[in-house]
Image: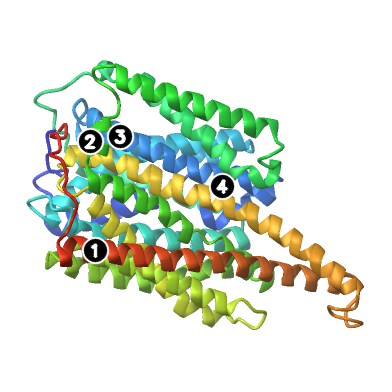
Amino acid sequence: MEIYDLFYKWIPIYLRVPVLILLFFVILCANGVFLGNLTDMASSLGMYPEHYTAAVNAMYIGMALGLMTEVRLKLRYSSKTLLLAGLSTMLLMKIICATTSNPWITIIAVFILGFAKISALIEVYIVQLMLWSKQLDTSRFYPFVYFVALGGLYLTSWGTASLAYYYNWRYAYILAVMILLVAILLTVLLVENHPLKKTMAISGMDWGSLFLLGVSMLLLNYVVVYGRVEDWFYSDSIKLAAFGFIFSFLVFLKRTLSISAPFFKLELFRKPTFRIGLLLFFILGVFSPGTFQSAFSAGILQYDTPTNMQLNLFLIPGVTAASIICFIWYYRKLDPEPMIIIGFAGFVVYHIMMYQSFSNEFALTDFWAPSIVKGFATCAIYIAVGLYTTKNFDLGVVMMAGGVMILVRSFLGSGIFSGVYNYILYAERVRHLDKLAVMTDRGGFFPNQLTGSGLYKALAEQSTLAASKEVTGYIIIFGFVLVAVLTLYYIRIKIIGTAPAVTPEPPLVK
């Protein structure tokens, strides 16, 4: 893999660094569907919000596949070509998302945007990594990456929500298109085209496996997202999608094992840290979805969308603290396992604080403390588990492994559990509402105090609170067990020194 500096030699360093940071921020935050205006977008078009939740998942699926493909693309095209192609495709998909009223077109466009985003992102990522570490040590750079990624995500969620609430949801896309045009102009003027000395044709790439993996993940996306709308156990379309996912994924595995140059190298799974890291990222999905906080703040406290998204700003101080601490932590070359334990313990503390806070008297400022803890835990886990998963990988293998990480962390983990939580919250809310209604008829709940719509509102709020507390309690119990297991594992392998024998690993394909 040939690596060159992006800019012309005559461009001074004080101009290069701001442009790099701007490009990095724009590429990371220019999503196909913004979480801040998702609800307004669905309401304006008269669609279920699940359509646009599926679009968010589709973007991460596209990013994962794009990162797996990027290794081969960098052996064929120059950095400027990939950067311009990625930014231009993102611009086109943004325009489609802003103008179409068909949710299925939106999902496809966002999937393509996620795939193209990686081509632009990797070029900026590699150059910034070289600035942070001449040895390409990702532990120096990861804290900055997730400070920008998570902080930018929370900031844009609040900004797009405000634009949608006070003006129109399309204004966010207009602003994003303008910023992307600026990024494209800067790329054309400042980025030098370095032709590759040796190129490899992409015709020999295993496009069939790429297609099968993409189809299987999109079908799984349909299954996990639309359960609350169509009901997993009775919907024929969900059953058909589930069968299609299983079939296409098994064909992908068979093809990967049978051809000489597969799209994905299964040898990666022979590395223990890679397997454990993916498992931890999947488990992260148990804690990370904001389903219950959103149901509480929007359904109980009746916050409007900008105020609800303003809660994301409270996460940024925690993200900042985690980024600084992780930089110092890895600069001193400390073990990653304690940071992973601290991160998951932070999620347990967050859910305990929220469990005790589920009441009608909770104020906006009361979200500060739990949000800071959650922001710290999220950033710490992203950095620590990410570095642990790709430990001792070279840059080319990191790209392939990173694609799997995105797929597990941002879709299979959070996407699946978010869909499950939405379904459970809906089902439990109905169950508690029926139970409270029976108690009301018997005079055991709000006797002679409320009638009509006021009574129904009170019952609905209490049923939401009861359902949220019930599921959050189970999450807390699971969190305690997980932190205990991780702590005992760390004590065993690092302090006592009785780690199980590990068989020699075959060399990873570079």
Which residue position is annotated with label 1?
490
**Hey, what amino acid is under mark 4?**
Thr
Q: Position of residue 412 (x, y in %)?
A: 45, 45
Residue drawn where x is 42% and y is 54% of the image: 283
Q: CA distance from mark 1 to mark 2?
A: 45 Å
Q: Is residue 30 visible?
A: no
Q: Nearer the viewer, mark 1 or mark 2?
A: 1
Say which mark, if any, is on residue 80: 2
Q: Is residue 236 visible?
A: yes
Q: Could you say which is closer to the camera, residue 331 or residue 43?
A: 331
Which residue position is annotated with label 3?
68
Q: Could you say which is closer to the camera, residue 223 or residue 276?
A: 276
Disc nearer the start of the sequence (2/3): 3
Disc nearer the start of the sequence (1/3): 3
Say which mark, if any, is on residue 53: 4
**Hey, what amino acid is under mark 3?**
Met
State left or right for residue 304 relative to residue 71.
Answer: right
Say which mark, if any, is on residue 348: none
Q: Residues within 10 Å of mark 2 (few under 14, many from 20)?
A: many
Disc nearer the start of the sequence (1/2): 2
Q: Nearer the viewer, mark 4 or mark 2?
A: 4
